[in-house]
Amino acid sequence: MFNLTVLSVWIGNATAVALQPPTNITFYQSLPDANRYILSIANAISLGLWAAYTTASSALRSVPFFRVSYSAFPLVSWRLFSLLRPSGDGISWHERKPRPVQSLDSLFIDDKDELVADCLRFFEPSSQARRTGRGKLPYMGMLLYGRPGTGKSSFALAVAQHLGVPIYRPGSLSTYDDQTFRSLMSAIQQKCVILLEDIDTADVTRSRNEANTSGAKVDKACLGTILEELDSLNVEGGAMVMMTTNHMEKLDPALIRAGRVHRRVEFQLASRETAAALFRNEFKDEMAEHDLDQAAKKFAAQIPDRRFSPAQIDEFLHGKEKDLEGALEGVSGWVKSTEAADLQDSVVGSPSESDGP
């Protein structure tokens, strides 16, 4: 029987196991008591953090571990990943027990490699030193825009996981007033990713020159407060702010101008190439690579280009529960029924003639 080198470490009440060789790393994370993900083993042995031993591969099957695999994006150092949410007091953060997060390998978006490389470069100490030397704050803004289900939030979570930095995720900004938003941002003191989701739902969709003539009290964090906090972010090691929106046209130009947003990334509906990649990812353990490629092409040929979101296609594939033939036979009917449902939704959502313009 083939023997595998297994590395094990205890972090709090969690146990993580990684298989060697490191060119094909698999992590097993115990659930539900786990409070961190272990993301890399490089340098870990030299730091004395791991205990190594040998065991038969079958021994792992009886252990209730959650599996996360990485291949295309090799990990380069010992890192921990954590997700932080606002605490009940509204002015501080607490660490949430992690749930499974998609790896970069399972996300299929345009220019993914280039985007990840940009994120890696930003957090490099040499890059941070250059920014400081030029009098710039250690801050990078990225606007992720596109239709719902195209992978904007998933990408931000996967990048934070890959980088091994905490991700601060306050949720909808429409739930915060100015004071609460200031308190939360000032409490961020470590190298991190900050995910501001659906930025268009906050009070930043109004122009700065538009007055609130209704007389009603505005309790949402306003544009000025958000701009002030972004401009004053000064976190040692760097803070990357990723803002997501389904409606970039609603955003005030001041929020997304050069200097605050260093890169705009459009997340598009799935191309046929993306559909094929999703199919291969779902059924990669079901058949030989050559046959799988042929099946993926057959699957993708039945899906209109740029018509459905990756999330919609992924949901259909997951529903087949590893039934490859069922996916190939059922996709045409799924396309027709989904298009019909979308058409019905658009008709219901359209104003009638009696509604006026």
Image: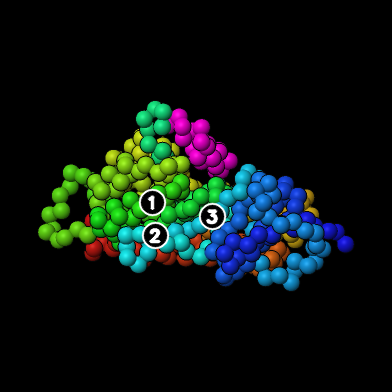
**In this view of the protein, can residue 317 be seen by the observer?**
no
**Three-letter code, disc 2:** Trp
Picture quadrant where residue 53 is located: bottom right
Disc 2 + disc 1, Cβ < 8 Å: yes
First of labels 2, 1 by sequence position: 2
Q: What is the spatial separation of the Cα atoms under label 2 and label 1, in whole angstroms?
A: 8 Å
The answer to whether residue 299 is above or below residue 125 is below
Which dot marks residue 93?
2
- Relative placement, left or right, of 91 versus 286 is left
Which dot marks residue 81?
3
Q: Residue at 42%, 32% (x, y): give it.
A: 131
Provide the secondary structure element on which disc 1 rests. loop
Disc 3 + disc 2, Cβ < 8 Å: no
For the C terminus, give its image quadrant: bottom left
Q: What is the spatial separation of the Cα atoms under label 3 and label 2, in whole angstroms?
A: 15 Å
Q: Residue at 53%, 58% (x, y): give it.
A: 311
Which of 185/249 is in front? 185
Which dot marks residue 305?
none
**In this view of the protein, can residue 348 be seen by the observer?**
yes
Q: Main secondary structure of the magenta part?
A: helix
- Relative placement, left or right, of 32 versus 324 is left
Q: Which residues are magenta?
A: 110-131
**Three-letter code, disc 1:** Ile
Counting other residues with Cα less than 10 Å from the Cα at mark 1, is it few (<14), some (14-19), or many (20 or more)?
some
Which dot marks residue 188?
1
**Three-letter code, disc 3:** Phe
Estimate the x, y position of residue 93 in percent, counting from the top left.
Answer: 39, 59
First of labels 1, 3 by sequence position: 3
Asked if the stretch drawn in magenta spans residue 169, the answer is no
